[in-house]
């Protein structure tokens, strides 16, 4: 008996309670609700409480995914957490989540950093480990506490990001042709400087001067990133469709990374697929990086926008610059 298909058994998500509206931000930086809405589609974002860490949000989303799957923590033997905002540089947020979730000590736990494409990278990694036959049930989590790496005085970035978490439980199935059908991952390291946190790593450890200069905050060349995002997400979507001999109109729902409504609209035009085939929640959460796709996936599942037999396309782009697409048959 070969168990080659990897299927999503349940989804869950978590967003902090505190809602920060555009209007609220316009009281602290020179911006306006109108500018943020028209340039990005964002109306509000969630911001974690002072004692609410990445591992707390990730564990909350994971509990909901376990509940939805009807899987107990004791059955999990693999936890992959996509994040670039772990609670601390070491140990991995995955290990802190393992403790909070009560996962067995025989669970392989690690973080993976592919920024906004992180969830698709983590999904691919977990599914490859499951199909190796050496693991049986995985939790895959995308979680970010971006409010801790955003410069709240920089209007070009602070209006765009939010906090949150999404999770899925993945298992093996004997049924062929379901679950994760394929992925396409890649990166363009030559453009790494367009979106980065230059300080606080081993190349530029934090010093009083570097902290005063704000080296530990996220820096982004928004316009350049925008143009690349549209081109590369369109290509990543086309590549995977071609690989599987599919047309765009055979996809029931595209779940794109939620960075900017205008990016999603441009991809909809390029793929000639109407916007009602795209899941959008960037208006309510802003850009939550690795958490954006699993939060959207969970909302799409729970609201009935994904049904058995449907084909879903995930597509993302982020710092690195990384990109990824994935095809799922439900
Ligand atoms: O998740 C990873 C990937 N990240 C992304 O995909 C983000 C990609 N980039 C974007 O979404 C867009 O480039 C932004 C939303 C960041 C910016 O939109 P834009 O249309 O590219 O605007 P811009 O950067 O060209 O800025 C236009 C003007 C500038 O003023 P000048 O130079 O024309 O006088 C900015 O200084 O808007 C100004 N501006 C703002 N004004 C009010 C920039 N930020 C703000 C702001 N409020 N928050």
Image: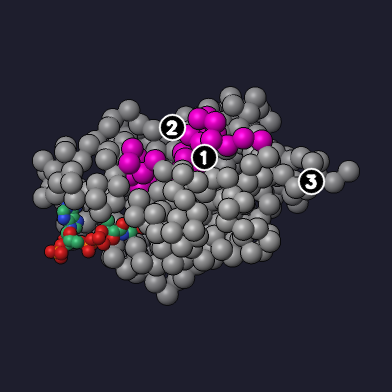
Residue 294 can be seen, yes or no: yes
Residue 313 percent coordinates (x, y) = 57, 50
Residue 225 percent coordinates (x, y) = 35, 64
Which residues are the magenta region? 281-308
* CA separation in Å, label 2 and label 1: 12 Å
- Helix, strand or loop at mark 1: helix
Query: For residue 291: magenta?
Result: yes
In the rendered image, which residue does mark 1 sit on? 297
Residue at horizontal 57 percent and vertical 56 percent from the top: 248
Residue at horizontal 35 percent and vertical 47 percent from the top: 287
Closer to the N terminus: mark 2 or mark 1?
Answer: 2
User: Picture quarter containing residue 75?
Assistant: top right
Graded by Cα atoms within 10 Å as few (under 14), some (14 to 19) or many (20 or more), the crowding at tag 1 reads: many
In the rendered image, which residue does mark 3 sit on? 176
Q: Quadrant of ligand 1?
A: bottom left
Above or below 93: residue 242: below
Seen from this angle, which residue lies furthest bottom? Answer: 190
Closer to the N terminus: mark 3 or mark 2?
Answer: 2
In the rendered image, which residue does mark 2 sit on? 14
> Closer to the camera: disc 2 or disc 1?
1
- Helix, strand or loop at mark 3: loop
Query: For residue 121: magenta?
Result: no
Asked if the residue at tag 1 contacts the one at tag 2, i.e. Cβ–Cβ closer than 8 Å, the answer is: no
* CA separation in Å, label 3 and label 2: 32 Å
Left/right placement of residue 231 relative to residue 244 reads left
Residue at horizontal 43 percent and vertical 59 percent from the top: 269
């Amino acid at each position: 008996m070969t168990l080659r298909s990897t299927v999503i058994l349940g989804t869950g998500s978590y967003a902090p309670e505190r809602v920060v509206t555009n209007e609220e931000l316009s009281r602290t930086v020179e911006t306006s609700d109108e500018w943020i809405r028209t340039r990005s589609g964002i109306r509000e974002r969630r911001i974690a409480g002072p004692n609410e860490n990445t591992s707390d949000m990730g564990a909350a989303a994971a509990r909901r995914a376990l509940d939805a799957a009807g899987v107990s923590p004791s059955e999990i033997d693999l936890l992959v957490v996509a994040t670039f905002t772990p609670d601390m540089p070491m140990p991995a947020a995955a290990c802190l989540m393992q403790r909070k979730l009560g996962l067995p000590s025989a669970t392989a736990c690690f973080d993976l950093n592919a920024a906004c494409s992180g969830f698709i990278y983590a999904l691919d990694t977990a599914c490859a480990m499951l199909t190796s036959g050496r693991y049986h049930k995985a939790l895959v989590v995308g979680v970010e506490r971006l409010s801790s790496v955003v410069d709240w005085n920089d209007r070009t970035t602070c209006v765009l990001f939010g906090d949150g978490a999404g999770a899925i439980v993945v298992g093996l199935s004997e049924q062929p042709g379901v679950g994760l059908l394929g992925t396409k991952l890649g990166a363009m390291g030559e453009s790494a400087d367009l979106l980065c946190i230059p300080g606080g790593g081993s190349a530029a450890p934090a010093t009083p001067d570097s902290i005063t200069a704000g080296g530990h905050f996220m820096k982004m060349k928004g316009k350049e990133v925008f143009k690349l995002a549209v081109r590369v997400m369109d290509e990543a979507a086309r590549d995977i469709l071609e690989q599987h001999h599919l047309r765009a109109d055979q996809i029931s729902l595209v779940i794109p990374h939620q960075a900017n409504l205008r990016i999603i609209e441009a991809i909809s035009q390029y793929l000639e697929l109407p916007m009602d085939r795209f899941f959008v929640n960037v208006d309510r959460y802003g850009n939550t990086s690795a958490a954006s796709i699993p939060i959207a996936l969970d909302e799409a599942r729970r609201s009935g926008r994904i049904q058995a037999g449907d084909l879903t396309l995930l597509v993302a782009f982020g710092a690195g610059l990384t990109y990824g697409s994935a095809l799922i048959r439900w």
